[in-house]
Image (cartoon, rainbow, N blue to C red):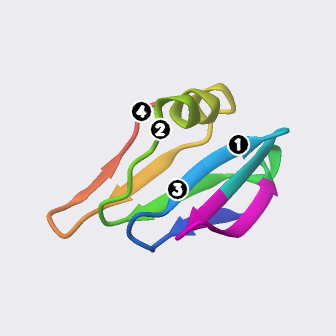
Amino acid sequence: MPNIYITEQDALLKTQRQNLQVFHQQEQYLSIPIRHVSQIIIFGNINLPQDIIKILQLHHIPVLFLTQESPQKSQK
């Protein structure tokens, strides 16, 4: 299962029909079934909506936030 790397500032994550979608500047860059995602790695200042966090927790998908200060990993 692939890791998903989010590197574009102001990227937006959404879900639709059990797919995780990544958008940037209103253009879809990725759509992948949630069950195929093993981990999400976020670089910089990218906001995760509460509904996405809940879905990721439900599927036990860890999220790693990397900033200039230090890496922070979300808890399941």
Number of marks drawn: 4
The residue tagged 1 is 15
Q: Is 24 part of what is drawn in magenta?
A: yes
Q: Which mark is residue 49?
A: 2
**Mark 3 → mark 1, Cα distance in angstroms:** 10 Å
Q: Amino acid at mark 4?
A: Gln
Q: Which mark is residue 12?
A: 3
Earlier sequence position, callout 4 versus callout 2: 2
Looking at the image, which residue is at 45% across and 74% down? 8
Closer to the eye: label 3 or 4 = 3
Earlier sequence position, callout 1 versus callout 4: 1
Tell me which secondary structure the magenta stretch mostly adopts: strand
Image height of 48 relative to 2, above or below: above
The residue tagged 4 is 75
* Label 2: few (<14), some (14–19) or many (≥20) C-alpha neighbours in 10 Å: few
Earlier sequence position, callout 1 versus callout 2: 1
CB contact under 8 Å: marks 3 and 4: no
**Mark 3 → mark 2, Cα distance in angstroms:** 9 Å
